């Protein structure tokens, strides 16, 4: 089934949670791990970010993130996945602080297992989820408590793949809505996402290249898994 940010603790217990924040936290983490970052530490706010960074050896970490789409002053990187190339991130631990995505991940930490998903790693994610025996909760990060089309569309794509396009009856209403959205717009993800509230609201701050990049399917074989507050690639070296 599926849940937005307003999930209750017991909805996650003993479950596998997949946090989806297509624009852009999930896409950024997947890109960073693909480009051989050592790990990503998601934090809920700037206070947490500075506390954690004080205890780390500075050449080995980057302090990164955005607030309302804009890079936080003094941080090494913002939240554009296009900035997370190998030259910048290889072997680094990234402390990531974003408006919605990293907060949703922190809260999803109550689940038995926490994975990060986006269009970029869809196939790799599905291959893992097909083997999962627990219930799966797709946590759509959204924007400040509201639904975001791009996250719901990605959740719909995940559900569609997991069910071979035939929706079983025993899923939550949210999953049915996501599935239906994917059936309607799945043929042209980028076109649909361009009309999203995020793309329209942040059009002066977030480039069209970022949006197009985040809408690509199956580009990276990365499975971000969170263990003890650190996200790393299950398949990583
Ligand atoms: C979020 O957490 O909502 C995103 O990171 C926002 C963004 O990238 O602009």
Image: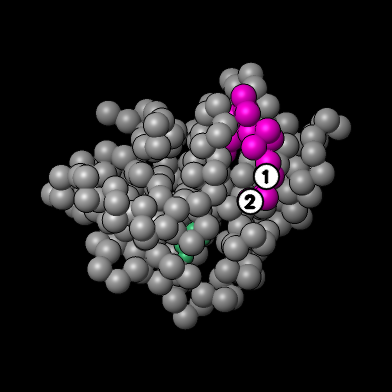
Instruction: Decide if ligand 1 comes within 8 Å of the CB at mark 2.
Output: no
* Residue sitting nearer the eye, 216 or 103: 103
Coordinates of residue 150 in the picture (x, y in percent): 61, 57
Reply yes or no: does residue 232 show up in magenta: no
* Residue sitting nearer the eye, 5 or 196: 5
From the viewer's perspective, tell me whether residue 117 is left or right of residue 12: left
Q: CA distance from mark 1 to mark 2?
A: 6 Å
Picture quadrant where residue 143 is located? bottom right
Quadrant location, the C terminus: top left
Q: Residue at x 83, y 30 (%)?
A: 170
Number of numbered discs visible in the structure rendering: 2
From the viewer's perspective, tell me whether residue 13 is left or right of residue 171: left
Please report the bounds of the magenta region as a residue range: 3-18
* Residue sitting nearer the eye, 216 or 151: 151
Q: Secondary structure at mark 2?
A: loop
Residue 123 in view of the camera: no
Q: Residue at x 59, y 75 (%)?
A: 200
Coordinates of residue 142 in the picture (x, y in percent): 61, 57
Coordinates of residue 130 in the picture (x, y in percent): 61, 24
Q: Secondary structure at mark 1?
A: loop
Reply yes or no: does residue 6 show up in magenta: yes
For the residue carrying disc 1, how many other residues have a C-alpha within 10 Å: few (<14), some (14-19), or many (20+)? some
Question: Is 156 located above or below residue 81 in the figure?
Answer: above
* Residue sitting nearer the eye, 151 or 9: 9
Quadrant location, the N terminus: top right
- Circles 1 and 2, Cβ within 8 Å, touching? The answer is yes
Q: Which residue is mark 2?
A: 5
Coordinates of residue 90 in the picture (x, y in percent): 22, 45
Q: Which residue is mark 1?
A: 7
Q: Can you tell which mark lies on residue 143?
A: none
Give the image's coloring scheme. one colour
């Amino acid at each position: 089934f599926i849940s937005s940010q307003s999930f209750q603790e017991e909805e996650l217990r003993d479950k596998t949670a997949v946090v989806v924040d297509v624009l852009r936290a999930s896409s950024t983490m997947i890109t960073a791990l693909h480009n051989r970052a050592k790990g990503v530490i998601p934090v809920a706010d700037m206070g947490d970010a500075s506390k954690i960074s004080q205890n780390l050896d500075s050449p080995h970490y980057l302090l990164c993130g955005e607030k309302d789409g804009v890079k936080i002053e003094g941080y090494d990187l913002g939240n554009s996945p296009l900035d997370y190339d190998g030259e910048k991130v290889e072997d680094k631990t990234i402390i990531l602080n974003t408006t919605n995505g990293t907060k949703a991940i922190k809260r999803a930490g109550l689940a038995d297992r926490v994975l990060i998903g986006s269009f970029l790693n869809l196939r790799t994610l599905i291959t893992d989820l097909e083997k999962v025996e627990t219930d799966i909760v797709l946590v759509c990060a959204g924007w400040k408590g509201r639904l975001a089309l791009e996250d719901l569309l990605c959740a719909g794509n995940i559900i569609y793949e997991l069910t071979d396009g035939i929706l079983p009856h025993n899923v939550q209403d949210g999953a049915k809505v996501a599935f239906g959205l994917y059936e309607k717009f799945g043929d042209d993800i980028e076109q649909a996402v361009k009309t999203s509230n995020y793309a329209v609201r942040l059009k002066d701050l977030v480039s069209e290249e970022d949006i197009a990049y985040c809408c690509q399917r199956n580009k990276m074989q990365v499975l971000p898994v969170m263990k003890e507050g650190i996200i790393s690639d299950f398949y990583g070296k």
